[in-house]
Image: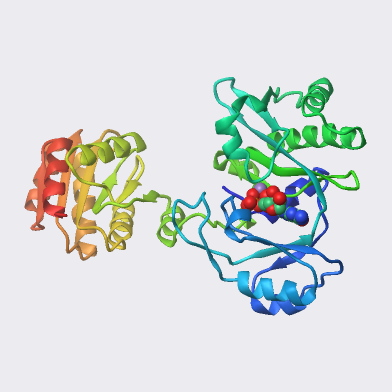
Amino acid sequence: MKLVEYEGKELFAKYGIPLSKAFGVIKNREDISKIKIDSYPCVIKAQVLAGGRGKAGGVKIAKDKAEAEKIMEKMLGMKMVTHQTAGKEISVDEILICESANIEREIYLAVTMDRKAGKPSLIACAEGGVAIEELAHSNPEAIIKIPVDPETGLLDFQARELAYALKIEKEVFCSFTDTAKKLCKLFIEEDASLAEINPLIVTKDKKLIALDSKVITDDNASFRHKEWDNIPDRESSEIEKEAKEIGINYIALDGNIGCMVNGAGLAMATLDTIKLAGGDAANFLDVGGGANVDQITKAFKIILKDPKVKAVMINIFGGIMKCDNIASGVTEAAKNVNIKVPLIVRLEGTRVKEGKEILAKSGLKIHQADSAWEAAKLAVQLAGK
Ligand code: GDP
Ligand code: MN
């Protein structure tokens, strides 16, 4: 799960990473008049799940109360497109207000998982800020990577070596090594897949401050982080949230063929097969290994909520679940849900003959296919353009 800046900074505070003073988070118009800002200039920051806010008008500095209010009024509800939103507009529903820092120098510091090495990796660059991605392209050797042992965390000598390599000023040297170690500790203990500070700044009066945060937590660890239940899911669409609640893996896609598949691997293969047949899937949907009538019914409803769907392809492999059970489930569910688009079913596996018979005798208009390839071609043809 991706955290917004102020949530990431709450974690930074928990681990003692130095921050600039925060005045609060604004979520609606009333908050604007209520917030107490006791020093200017202040910085007003859009809390959205995308970087590049600085360049897109999502980070503004105000010199006094009047200017701050004007900026907050304008920013709240604003639609923003940054280089990280893939051309899509995102709406600014929350704003963070902090004391503005006097920046002398911007550093990049992050911890991420190095899958090849099988351990976390601390990544740093002497020149942080908004141009880090260009720098990574034009001058990749400027980026320093240090492997972190998850048992010991970042060791003192590693932190010092990094500080020397980045030419960290002596006034903030200890604060830097301390922050680097704390960021690694946070990454490990909070089960993050990314913990990034960009920029980590040195102020004109020689203080080290984490000016921004980007933290992504690993959903696989949610069983040991009950506190994550309180963090709002800002990424999923309404349909995706609904699917999650009933235990179905659903991801919306751009095509027009709705898919219902059991097993994530088969679901991936189904998307590829549809593509190969010249079409595009409207979703990835895995009903799981033990799909029952109830789940199949719910899955149908979810697929059909997407107005783009012009045909539904069911691709089920009966393993532990037998094909005849699945076929009964599909017919039962199809009777419950008003399906106005062509329905293509491919069954394979245990008791497939019986399953196909149930579908054929159901009285429903179901197109049966003998192979995934045949089903995909049929779905593409019936969905049209
Ligand atoms: P991002 O563009 O979404 O990564 O947002 P950041 O929080 O990193 O802000 C972008 C840039 O705005 C930073 O690299 C800084 O140069 C600048 N900035 C952010 N906060 C402050 C601040 O408190 N004071 C000043 N002077 N500049 C700031
Ligand atoms: Mn940033």
Q: What is the x, y in percent for residue 360?
A: 7, 49
**The C terminus, quarter of image:** bottom left
Q: What is the x, y in percent for residue 346?
A: 16, 41
Q: Quadrant of the rendered structure where residue 267 is?
A: top left
In the displayed structure image, the side of residue 42 where residue 117 appears, left or right: left
Nearest the eye: 40 or 155: 40
Nearest the eye: 170 or 38: 170
Q: Residue at x 57, y 47 (%)?
A: 1
Nearest the eye: 63 or 213: 63
Q: What is the x, y in percent for residue 235?
A: 51, 54
In the displayed structure image, the side of residue 281 where residue 210 appears, left or right: right
Q: Quadrant of the rendered structure where residue 239 is?
A: bottom left
Residue 171 visible in this rendered orientation of the protein:
yes
Q: Residue at x 84, y 66 (%)?
A: 40
When the figure is inspected, residue 130 is found, relative to residue 142, above or below; the finding is: below
Q: What is the x, y in percent for residue 357?
A: 9, 45
Q: Residue at x 27, y 51 (%)?
A: 255
